[in-house]
Each structure stands twice: as structure tokens, then as C-alpha cells.
Amino acid sequence: MKPVIRVEGVSKQYRIGTRHSAHHGSLKQTLSEIFRSAFKVNQHQNGDSPGGEWVWVLKDVGFEVMPGEIVGIIGRNGAGKSTLLKILSRVCEPTSGRVELYGRLGSLLEIGTGFHPELTGRENVYLNGAILGMARREIDRKFDEIVDFSEIEKFLDTPVKHYSSGMYMRLAFSVAVHLEPEVLVMDEVLAVGDVAFQKKCLEKMARVARGGRTVLFVSHSLSSVSELCNRVILLKDGKIEEAGPTEQVIDSYLREVSPTSTGGFTASTHDRDMLIAEAQTFDPEGRVKSCFTHNEDILIAVKCKINRWVPNTVMGFNVTDHRGRKVFTANNPEWSRLEPRTGEVGMTVKIPRHFLVPGKYVFTFAVNDDWVENVLPIVIADAGSDFARFEGGDYGCVFANCEWTLDSV
């Protein structure tokens, strides 16, 4: 099968600390440029460099994407993610290398990409369709679907300059996915929408990919990337650090941004009577990982070091979510049954599937007076749940496996 995107040795260099002249600017802009030029001459005469500094935003990036793939692109701010998508979308040209793209591309790089602020929502739908190379009859055929999905029918004949950022995003996304590009490129735009609409967009992108079209998705939401993408590219300092299966690459990224995330942690002090020495998370197959779906068991291996036995102690942990809420606390009943001893004690605890709701979490472990706080960050992704149908998509803190009795029909 022929790839729909082929990127070969793409590099991009920018100069920082300089301004481009305004060839067609106003008189005020022209006078400002003349003043800056004179100022730069004075800087040069005083020994300062007028040329600015050249930096490589991307360096020798290469990969292929096959039809129907949903590929996530992740990395820290400044890693080159947005620049890569701009090159793919022909917004800017690479300094070196080449990009081959087969098929029509729809891009959503920022809110309202391709929208004219003075035109109405209705007019912008047709403008975007024309930019994508679609005939008017094709846009007519999709128009009602676009409006229904965007949920802004009431404001359709209002100039988009009066839209909120959320309304912009709703219409722009709806246009991008419904006008049937072979390749859809998206850069973190879903962060603007409410939770329910984000969920709706992710489901739509998944349906788009199942229909044979290709999606490139840049996001800092690892749970969204995990839920949506079947392959991920990790960028670091403008280069591809790793590319491969979603969970594997996300785990690598989490190890980078938080060294204790998947490799566990080791205590730096051993002078306490009892202490938490090591801990790490893994799946039931024994693979060390930090990204799970909500229907997976989460296993945590913990080692305690006992230098001196202290009677009547308690060992356990608590879990905190990304909002800073303490979700639950679990004490270890087996600890109280231990015979007095010294040395290491290893134990494993299982957090059952269908318990933690999708989100990001950290752990705090304790034994006696030793506390290890906010370690082992994990991500729980939604693998598909009836709870997602609730308005707003807010699951609360945990899924509750309550017992129900049907009293009458």
C-alpha cells in the first residue's frame, strides 16, 4: 500500500532576534522599519551583532503515514510539532528536505484557520470548501451535516468576528471533518471546546479514520492521544525521539518529563526506621507502563525497607487527580499481620479495572512516618464507556460498581 504522506529529511531553520521588512505596510510601518534599520547600524558600530541567531526548529525529520492511520504527534512545547504541521499544510516551506502528500488535505492549525472575520458562518463554510477545492454542489450536500454537528445554527448568519473561541472551534472543526479531505491535520484546537464537544470530536475523527481517511493529531492531552491514535511520533528538540505504538511512546514521553513515571522511584535516604524504598506501575502481563485504559487492571509493586521494626505501624497509599482532589486512600491490611523483621518487604496491590475514571493521577505512599508524595504519574484513557453519554463528560472521581435490584417492571 502506498503511503498518503511521506516526509524525507525535513529541516526548518528560523532567525530569531530580527524582523522582516514590511514591503507593503503602512507609512507608519515603513518609518518604523527605517528607524529600526538606523538603530541596527548603531548597534553594529558599537560592536553588537545585527544579524540575530539562527535556530533549527526541525532537523532531519522523516516518516511515512499510511491511509486510514491516526497518528499522534507529542512532545514538549518548542519540540517542533506545530512547525511540522505547518510544513505539511503548506503554510511554510522546509529549509531542506521534501514532503510528498497524496490527496486533499484539510488542516485545523489554530482556531478559525481560513475563516474571514467579516463573513458569516454560512459564507465561511463555502469559503473553506472552495479552499479545499470542492465544488459548490459538494458543499451543498454536506452543509446541513456541518451545521448540525457544529451546534451553532442560531448564529450561522452572524459574522464570525463576533463568535467566541469555542464557537469558532465548533464550526472550523465541523467544516474540516465534513468536507472529506483525504488527510486531516489538527493542532491542539480541541482544548478550546467544552468536554462534551471534545468527546464528540474525538469520536468523529475515529469514524473519519475508519472510513479510510488519515488524521495527524497534535495534542498535549495524552488521554486523547491514547484513546484516538494507533501510532505516535515523539518529537524532542526538533528531531524524532521515538515513533511506534501509542502506549509505548507515551510511556517514553512520561519517563522523559517525569523520570519516576514508569521506571518507578528509589528512595534517596535510608536512615529511617521504615521507609518506602521503591514503587512502579505495570499491567497484568508484567509490562512496566504508565498509560492505561479505564478497563485495565493497574498493578503497583512496592518495596519497603525495614531498618528497625516499629510495632503498630500502618502502610498504604492515596491517589490524587489532576485537579488536586484526593480520590481515595487504601491501607494495607496485610502489613498488620507481618511478624517483626528487618530487611526488604515486597508487595503488590491491584487497582481494579472500571474504577479510576479517565484522567491523570499521582500516588503518595506512606509507611510509619515516611511519606513519598506525588510520584508515579499515570494516565487513564477512556476505552469507550456508556458514562461518556452523560452531559459534559464529567465522570466524577471514580466509577462505582453499585449493586442494583429491579423491584418492579
Image (cartoon, rainbow, N blue to C red):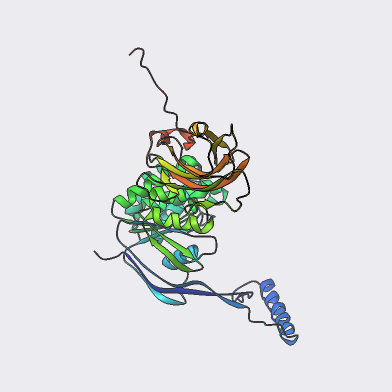
Q: Where is 127 relative to 17, above or below?
A: above
Does residue 143 appear anywhere in the picture? no
Quadrant hosting residue 39: bottom right
**Can I make out residue 355 in this image?**
yes
Residue at the farthest top position = 408
Of 323 and 150, nearer the camera is 323
Residue shown at the point (41%, 40%) measured from the top left: 294
Work out whether 179 lies above or below 55.
above
Looking at the picture, how far across and down is residue 257, in whole percent? Answer: 53, 57
**Would you identify the image quadrant in which residue 77 lies?**
bottom right
The quadrant in which the N terminus is found is bottom left
On the image, the x and y values in percent for residue 335 come to: 51, 34
Above or below 293: residue 327: above
Above or below 197: residue 30: below
Question: 272 left or right of 193?
Answer: right
Q: Position of residue 324 (x, y in %)?
A: 59, 41
Image mark count: 0
Question: What x and y, as percent, mark residue 156?
Answer: 47, 45
Q: Work out which residue is located at the far bottom of the displayed protein and give it.
A: 45
Left/right of residue 15 with respect to residue 288 in the rendered view = right
- Depth order, front residue of 378/313: 313
Image quarter hosting the C terminus? top left
State the residue in front, 35 or 305: 305
Nearest the eye: 60 or 168 = 60
Return the residue found at the far left.
1
